[in-house]
Amino acid sequence: MTSEVRILPATAERFDDVAVMVGPKNPGANVCWCLSHRLPAKVHRELQGTERRDAMLELCSRDVAPGVLAYVGDEVVGWAAVAPRAELPVARSRKILPVDDLPVWSIICVRVRPGHRGQGVSHALVGGAAEYARTNGAPAVEAYPVDNRGEKVDLTMAFVGVRSVFEAAGFEMVATTDAVAGGFPRVVVRRTFA
């Protein structure tokens, strides 16, 4: 299936597809819009209803998109958020510490639509997000997935990804963390570009 998956930047022109992947069914609902791990906590808490939509639209309107979208045919089936670590709250985390001073990019969310899970979409998203970071000058890209050792991960916490998917995309574990998601420890995985 992964050969049928196309990965494209989440630009303003594709904002309707971004909304399908990270927006609520009710436009005024206070849901994440994949902003909770992108914005400082205070700013995130202050955004209400459609302000969240507007904040994501502003991110998608920048020269560098806030992530990538996965398509099968013309249907959007997945999302991966990726950005320079220095721009994200994880840069200030006390539980996920920097490995070194390299200005890495971070993949902070991977989401696949129901009906398309278990078909290789997350693998395509991780590889596509890494490639997007590389083409935008990243010397390396990191992620902070759970090390679930093959055990089932609760879908509400699966957005951080699982270690095996990243390793299949050429990432290597470079550090442990004090962070936990869904009862599993999170690790730092990294793919460095030549």
Image (cartoon, rainbow, N blue to C red):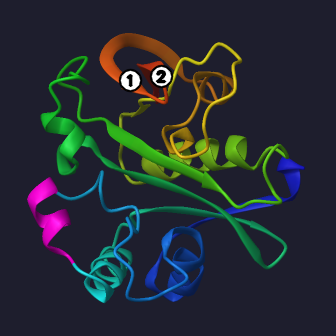
Marks 1,2: beta carbons within 8 A: yes
Instruction: Please state which of residues 28 and 100 is positioned toward the viewer in this rendering.
Output: 28
Which residue is drawn at the image coordinates 15% and 55% (left, top)?
A: 41
Real-space Cα distance between discs 1 and 2? 6 Å
Residue 46 in the magenta stretch? The answer is yes
Circle 1 sits on which residue?
180
Circle 1 SS class? strand
- Residue 108 vertical placement versus 149 (above, below): below
Instruction: Please identify the quarter of the rendering in which residue 64 is found.
Output: bottom left
Circle 2 sits on which residue?
183
Over which residues does the magenta segment extend? 40-47
Circle 2 SS class? loop
In-image side of 151 versus 148 (left or right) = right
Which residue type carries mark 2? Gly
Which residue type carries mark 1? Val
- Image coordinates of residue 140 in percent, x first then y, are 39, 32
- Image coordinates of residue 4 in percent, x first then y, are 87, 58
- Image coordinates of residue 17 in percent, x first then y, are 60, 79
Label 1: few (<14), some (14–19) or many (≥20) C-alpha neighbours in 10 Å: some
- Image coordinates of residue 161 in percent, x first then y, are 55, 36
- State the predominant SS element of the stretch in magenta: helix
